[in-house]
Image (cartoon, rainbow, N blue to C red):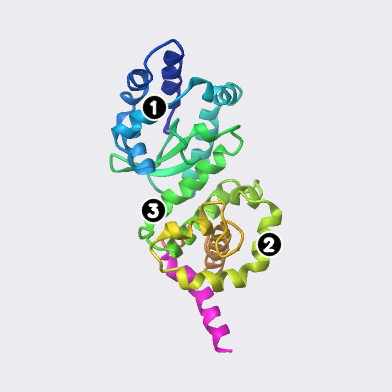
Amino acid sequence: MPVNLAYRDFLKALDAIEGGADPWDAYQHYYARRHRALLEAYWRQCWGSDEARERELVREMRPQDYRALRESLAVSNIEVLAREALERCAPLVNLPEPQADLLVGRFSPDAFLFRVGGQWHIGVGLERFAQFSSLPLLIAHEYGHYARRMLAPEPRTVGDRVIAEGASVAFAEAAYPERRLTRHLRMTPRRVHEIRELEPRLWAALAPCLDAEDVEAFAGVLYSGRRWQGFPPRFGCCLGYWAVRHFAHARGESVVSRAVLAAESATILDPYMARLRRAGQS
């Protein structure tokens, strides 16, 4: 399975900086030039930055800030963890395998999907990790995003993103069924129970916004820890997961079948919207 251990070259750059080398020169020599296409894609797609901003961030790096990462890496074989995740995911869907890039960026997302040279890659920003028990689940989640990106229309709206997140949670759960759903959702059982209790109200509140394309305005629904309209953070991940599971079950399909992964979000959401319309007429 393709796993790129780019972080090892970043650690070489840190060693050189600790030895007195200029940070930018060491970063370029040991890390950036060896992974140019990868890191250019990372900086552009995750930060939207140019070389001047990249240079500024690199010069702000302090080797001591990465001591905890070094300690965690010393007691974890993350290459084995990453390969295990890819080996579990690949048989679930018949697609070319994406490469997993284990890199160090600057406040990267834990894991993310991005394009390198026209190909989808799964990136993992190791600087965010205190320990690596969640690494396989994160890679499996991003593999789910990859599968849906390959098979379904590109997400544009809030509704598309809700279903994309739900499909990825369901995909990761299929790869790691022994892990609790709360681990896949990255929520406490209490939070999941709260969202389940609020589900009808959440659908009613979110329904008018599902076609919105300004996804960042609804970050609290999916990505961030802040609340949207006072509701629990990231409740959209639960709604999307339940919607995908319901859609698959109604058709007698697996959540990782092409029929489910390729389904348009509006089709998956339609039973919930129909229910709301019926409730409005009663």
Q: Secondary structure at mark 1?
A: helix
Residue placed furthest toward the bottom: 282
Q: Nearer the viewer, mark 2 or mark 1?
A: 1
Which circle's residue, 2 or 1, is located before the other in the chain? 1
The amino acid sitting under disc 2 is Glu
Say which residue label 2 marks.
194
Question: Closer to us: mark 3 or mark 2?
Answer: 2
Q: Amino acid at mark 1?
A: Val
Expressed as whole percent of the image width and height from the top left, the position of residue 70 reads: 55, 22
Q: CA distance from mark 1 to mark 3?
A: 32 Å
- The mark that comes first in sequence, 3 or 2, is 3
> Residue 155 in the image: x percent, y percent?
38, 59
Q: Residue at x 39, y 27 (%)?
A: 58
Q: Is residue 265 above or below residue 282?
A: above
Q: Which residues are magenta?
A: 263-282
Secondary structure at badge 2 equals helix
Q: Nearer the viewer, mark 1 or mark 3?
A: 1
Q: Quadrant of the C terminus?
A: bottom right
User: Taking 111 as reference, is 173 left or right?
Assistant: right
Crowd rating for badge 3 (residues with CA inside 10 Å; few <14, some 14–19, many 20+): some
Q: Nearer the viewer, residue 274 or 2?
A: 274
Nearer-N-terminus badge (1/3): 1
Q: Amino acid at mark 3?
A: Arg
What residue does disc 3 label?
Answer: 149
Q: Is residue 47 visible?
A: yes
Q: Which of the numbered marks, if any, corresponds to residue 189? A: none
Q: CA distance from mark 2 to mark 1?
A: 42 Å
Q: Secondary structure at mark 3?
A: helix
**Is 272 inside the magenta-drawn segment?**
yes
Percent coordinates x, y for residue 83 in the rendering? 50, 34
User: According to the image, label 1 marks what residue?
Assistant: 58
